[in-house]
Image (cartoon, grey):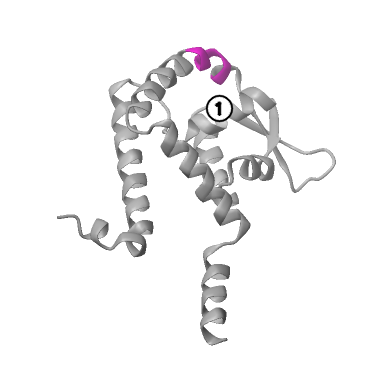
């Protein structure tokens, strides 16, 4: 018996966290198995910078909808591994502009080939119906977050 499953909606956040943790653990194992010298969540930054060339940390954070500190942590590790470099924005010295290094561009085709294999494997876990539902969930949470919804329920019950 899966206790979280038995909790239905009240257990959903724990189930999503459990899935996320399992996927991240498995991704680390996959990267180790494939001898990929990067961390699993770096691919998002690689792909974004490949497409956009240069972005500030804030722009990366906004595009990925990750916290600013999370992006700073990823960028710091990618810098230490020689995959990104940053320069101070000429217009705003508080901003750091991030771009891929020559090393990153050189290794990107091999990384993308491995990511294509990983994508196929992930497709065997999640189908298009799941992705459609995920889009709905994300939209619902953007439209009105959990706190707003709880306040709304509480207000309606007190009327």
Q: Residue 90 vs residue 82: left or right?
A: right
Residue 57: x percent and y percent? 65, 42
Q: Nearer the viewer, residue 76 or 46?
A: 46
Residue 56: x percent and y percent? 70, 39
Q: Is 27 drawn above or below residue 118 in the view shown?
A: below
Residue at image position (57%, 81%) is 155
Q: Is 86 drawn above or below residue 51 in the view shown?
A: below
Residue at the spot of label 1: 46
Residue located farthest toward the right when viewing the structure as drawn: 91
Residue 41: x percent and y percent? 46, 36
Element type at mark 1: helix
Residue at image position (33%, 27%) is 124
Type of secondary structure dominating the magenta stretch: helix
Q: Nearer the viewer, residue 57 or 86?
A: 57
Residue at image position (56%, 47%) is 66
**Quarter of the rendering containing residue 49:** top right
Which corner quadrant holds the N terminus? Answer: bottom left
Whether residue 112 is visible to the viewer of this picture, yes or no, is yes
Q: How many marks?
A: 1
Residue located farthest toward the left when viewing the structure as drawn: 1
Residue located farthest toward the bottom when viewing the structure as drawn: 158
Residue 36: x percent and y percent? 38, 23
What is the span of residues highlighted in magenta in the rendered image? 104-109
Q: Residue 17 vs residue 98: left or right?
A: left
Q: Residue 90 vs residue 17: left or right?
A: right
Whether residue 100 is visible to the viewer of this picture, yes or no, is no
Residue at image position (57%, 45%) is 72
Which corner quadrant holds the C terminus? Answer: bottom right
Q: Residues within 10 Å of mark 1 (few under 14, many from 20)?
A: many
Q: Residue 41 vs residue 46: left or right?
A: left
- Taking the magenta stretch, the answer to whether it contains residue 82 is no
């Amino acid at each position: 018996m899966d206790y979280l499953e038995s909790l239905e909606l009240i257990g959903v956040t724990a189930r999503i966290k459990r899935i996320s943790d399992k996927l991240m653990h498995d991704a680390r194992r996959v990267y180790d198995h494939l001898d990929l010298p990067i961390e699993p969540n770096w691919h998002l930054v690689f792909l974004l910078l490949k497409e956009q060339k240069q972005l500030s940390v804030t722009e990366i954070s906004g595009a990925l909808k990750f916290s600013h500190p999370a992006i700073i942590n990823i960028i710091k590790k990618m810098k230490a591994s020689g995959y990104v470099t940053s320069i101070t924005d000429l217009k705003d010295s508080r901003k750091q502009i991030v771009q891929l290094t020559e090393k990153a561009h050189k290794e990107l085709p091999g990384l993308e080939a491995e990511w294509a294999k990983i994508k196929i494997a992930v497709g065997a876990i999640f189908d298009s119906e799941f992705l459609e539902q995920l889009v709905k969930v994300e939209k619902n949470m953007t439209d009105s977050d959990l706190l707003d919804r709880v306040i709304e329920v509480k207000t309606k019950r007190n009327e």
